[in-house]
Amino acid sequence: MTQVSSIEENVEDNNIMNNNSQEKYLADYKPSDFLVESLDLDFDLFDENTLVKATTKINRVAGENSSLFLFGENLSLRSIMVNDLTFTDYKLVEGGIELFKLPDSFVLVIERLCWR
């Protein structure tokens, strides 16, 4: 299983990237609240863009009410589903998307367009 970054870790990483004089050590990293059990990616390639469908099985391992942050740039979100239901409890933010109020175990399906 692969760990997914938590929003707190991502904010710290962005601060470090913006301030090259600050170092981050292995001891500073916080384990993720989520583990990825599996990931399936489908790509439909077109002249102007690529449609990507990501199906991810995810389990919460800590942080009862923690959000999940997923990195992404140059994306046009088409849909988000959690356990086969349309999911609307998210916020698009600079550098990605933050999802809230997720169940402890779920299948996340995100469809998006990536522009070239």
Image (tube, rainbow, N blue to C red):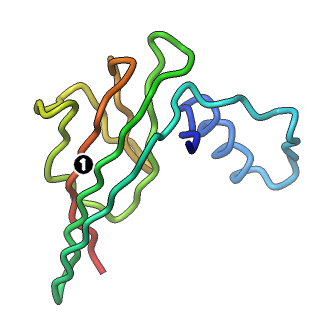
Along the line of sight, the residue nearer the viewer: 68 or 19: 68
Tell me if residue 32 comes above or below residue 108 in the rendering: above
Type of amino acid under label 1 = Ile
- Residue 106: give x, y in percent of width and height: 31, 29
Q: Quadrant of residue 116?
A: bottom left
Q: Residue furthest bottom?
A: 47
Q: Residues within 10 Å of mark 1 (few under 14, many from 20)?
A: some
Tell me if residue 25 comes above or below residue 20 in the rendering: above
**Quadrant that contains the N terminus:** top right
Residue for point 36% across, 39% down = 57
Q: Quadrant of residue 49?
A: bottom left
Along the line of sight, the residue nearer the viewer: 4 or 91: 4
- Residue 61: give x, y in percent of width and height: 55, 21
In the rendered structure, the answer to whether residue 30 lies left or right of residue 109 reads right
- Residue 90: give x, y in percent of width and height: 28, 31
- Dot 1 corresponds to which residue? 110
Residue for point 24% across, 45% down = 109
In the rendered structure, the answer to whether residue 4 lies left or right of residue 19 reads left
Tell me if residue 67 comes above or below residue 73 in the rendering: above
Residue for point 29% across, 61% down = 75
- Residue 52: give x, y in percent of width and height: 25, 64
Residue for point 19% across, 69% down = 51
* Dot 1: element: strand
